[in-house]
Image (cartoon, rainbow, N blue to C red):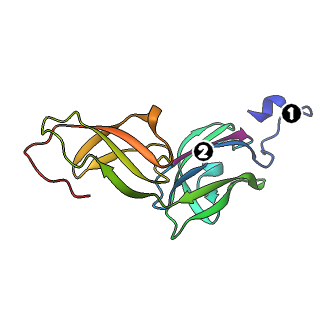
Amino acid sequence: VFNNTCMQGATSECPRPRIDSIRPLSGPVEGGTLVTIEGSNLGIREEDVRGKIKIGNVPCELVNYEISVKIECRTGAVDKETVASIKVGNEAGVTESSIHFQYKDFKVEKITPTQGPQSGGTQVQIYGRHLNIGSSVIAYLDDYICHINTTLATNDRLVCITTASRSPEFIRT
């Protein structure tokens, strides 16, 4: 906590926040990305920063807080793709990051193969754009989860393994 590093004695007021790192740097326009902000002077208490975290003008809901050094917040939704700075405030003022967060609109363009055994285990390739954005990537084929191989995930391709289905059925693409 900054009080231990003040050279002129402890004080009860924090200086303005300092933002050192932000991750991830992109997420879907629908929101829901868990963003980690690390730095210093990020408040003495959770209440110091609650409601004072924004990406552009969109509030980022505080989820986790580590005194003065780390904030995790969940992004809100935006209408379209946009690039915005992160703003964190405390009692001393607001700091705007030089690093920007990008809201991106992901799109699935093709899925192959289009059929597999009911027992699951089929390796499926999903093609599109901005497929690996956000804090976590999950794929579903209708109501069935398809386990993503994160080591093979790229911006334009995901590889996943299907799970078993209750009965033979066509998956909507």
Identify the residue at image location x=56%, y=59%: 103
Identify the residue at image location x=75%, y=47%: 17
Q: Nearer the viewer, residue 139 or 123?
A: 123
Please give the residue where the numbered disc 2 appears in the rendered image: 46
Magenta stretch: give its range. Answer: 34-40
3D distance between C-alphas at marks 2 and 1: 21 Å
Above/below status of 50 relative to 147? below
Image quarter of the N terminus: top right
Q: What residue type is labelled 2?
A: Glu
Residue 37 magenta: yes
Q: Position of residue 92 (x, y in %)?
A: 78, 53
Left or right of residue 78: residue 95: right
* Residue furthest bottom as drawn: 79
Please give the residue where the numbered disc 1 appears in the rendered image: 6
Q: Where is residue 20 in the image (x, y as percent from the top left)?
A: 74, 41
Disc with the residue nearer the chain's start (2 vs 1):
1
Label 1 sits on a secondary structure element that is loop
Above/below status of 29 relative to 7? below
Structural crowding at the residue carrying mark 2, measured as other residues with C-alpha within 10 Å and reported as few (<14), some (14–19) or many (≥20): some
Q: Which of 17 and 11 is in front in this view?
A: 17
Q: Position of residue 21 (x, y in %)?
A: 69, 41
Image quarter of the C terminus: bottom left
**Are dots 2 and 1 in contact, CB under 8 Å?**
no
Left or right of residue 28: residue 109: left
* Residue furthest front as drawn: 113
Quarter of image, res 89: bottom right
Q: Which amino acid does label 1 sit on?
A: Cys
